[in-house]
Structure formats: C-alpha cells, structure tokens
Image (spheres, grey):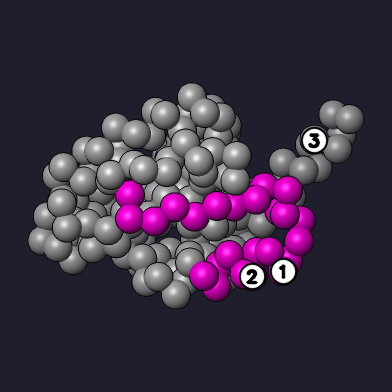
C-alpha cells in the first residue's frame, strides 16, 4: 500500500510538471492581481474548491463576502462538489455555483464537459481555496478553466511544487 501511495504521489508530481511545461502559466504577482481587481480589469472570478468538507466550505464564506464587499461589480462563481452545492445556494455574493461530481474524476468525458462549460464563461481569475488537503484536481480544473490567471495556496507546505508549475 505504501508503495502504491508513493507511485501515486510521483505520478501527480509528473502530471503537474508536464502540464506546467506544456501550458505555462501567465505570470502575475499578487500586487498585479490586486491592481487588476481595483482597476476593474479582473471582472469574473472562479473560486475553486470541489473537494471539501462542510467546515472548509463554510470557511470560504468570508472570502466570498469580502470579495463582493470590496468589488461589488465582480462576478463570482464557485466550483464545489455535488454534496456541498446546496450549502452555497442563496449566498448573495455568488453569481453562479458549479458542481463537480468527484465520482466522475476518472471519466475523461466528465472532465471535457466541465472544462468546456467553464471555458465558455471567460474567467479572468481562478482562485483555488485551501482546505486541509492538497488537491491536484482543483488545480487542474482551475488551470483548464480558461482563466487568464490562476492563483492559490502555497503547495510547498505540502512538500510539492505544483503551485509553482500551475499558478500565475
């Protein structure tokens, strides 16, 4: 079992490396992203956290509220898993809720459909919210959403360099 976990970790790291090399991120500093928000050049954000427990999801509520308070014209979409989608319903800061069925993660057709739908939205920024676990799936959904910029938490704290390879 330990051997299989080690192979899985190496495979995920190789995937992050290959995708980052094939599709290099458009680089931006946090300051540049902040200025883009303030100047209205970033108009549509996708918050990504499809794998979270209800507690992690509730911790995202202040992020939504603060973004909307600071930038009222900002369009905010949230990508959650199907189990937590209902907990986001009625959140006044969200313009749209996307549901990712984590049971479909191994189906290429499900990936194609979700990514195609996300790309049509024309996101300026995909922001990956942290939970208690590193999620390459979250990063890939954000990366392939078509957002001009992808930002997220420091993956080095998890012993991985995925963020450096996949984030703006």
Location of the N terminus (image quadrant): top right
Residue 157: image tag: none
Residue tagged 2: 112
Q: Secondary structure at mark 1?
A: helix
The residue beneath circle 1 is 109
**Rendered image quadrant of residue 41:** bottom left
Stretch of the chain drawn in magenta: 94-117
Question: Which residue lies at the image location 34% right of the left edge and 42% below the top edge?
Answer: 91
In the image, residue 43 above or below residue 90: below
* First in sequence: mark 3 vs mark 2: 3
Give the image location of residue 66, x and y in percent: 22, 38
Crowdedness near tag 1: few (<14), some (14–19) or many (≥20) residues, C-alpha within 10 Å? few
Badges 3 and 2: C-beta atoms under 8 Å apart?
Answer: no
Question: Pointer 3: what residue?
Answer: 5
For marks 2 and 1, give the CA distance.
5 Å
In screen coordinates, is 46 left or right of 82? Answer: left
């Amino acid at each position: 079992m330990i051997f299989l976990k080690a192979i899985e970790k190496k495979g995920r790291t190789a995937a992050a490396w290959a995708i980052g090399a094939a599709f290099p991120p458009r680089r931006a500093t946090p300051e540049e992203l902040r200025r883009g928000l303030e100047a209205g050049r970033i108009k549509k954000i996708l918050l990504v956290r499809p794998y979270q427990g209800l507690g992690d999801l509730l911790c995202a509520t202040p992020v939504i509220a603060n973004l909307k308070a600071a930038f009222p014209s900002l369009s905010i979409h949230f990508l959650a898993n199907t189990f937590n989608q209902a907990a986001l319903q009625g959140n006044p800061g969200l313009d749209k809720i996307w549901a990712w069925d984590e049971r479909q993660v191994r189906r290429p057709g499900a990936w194609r459909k979700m990514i195609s739908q996300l790309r049509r939205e024309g996101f300026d920024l995909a922001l990956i919210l942290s939970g208690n676990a590193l999620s390459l799936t979250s990063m890939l959904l954000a990366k392939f959403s078509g957002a001009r910029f992808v930002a997220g938490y420091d993956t080095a704290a998890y012993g991985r360099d995925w963020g450096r390879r996949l984030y703006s």
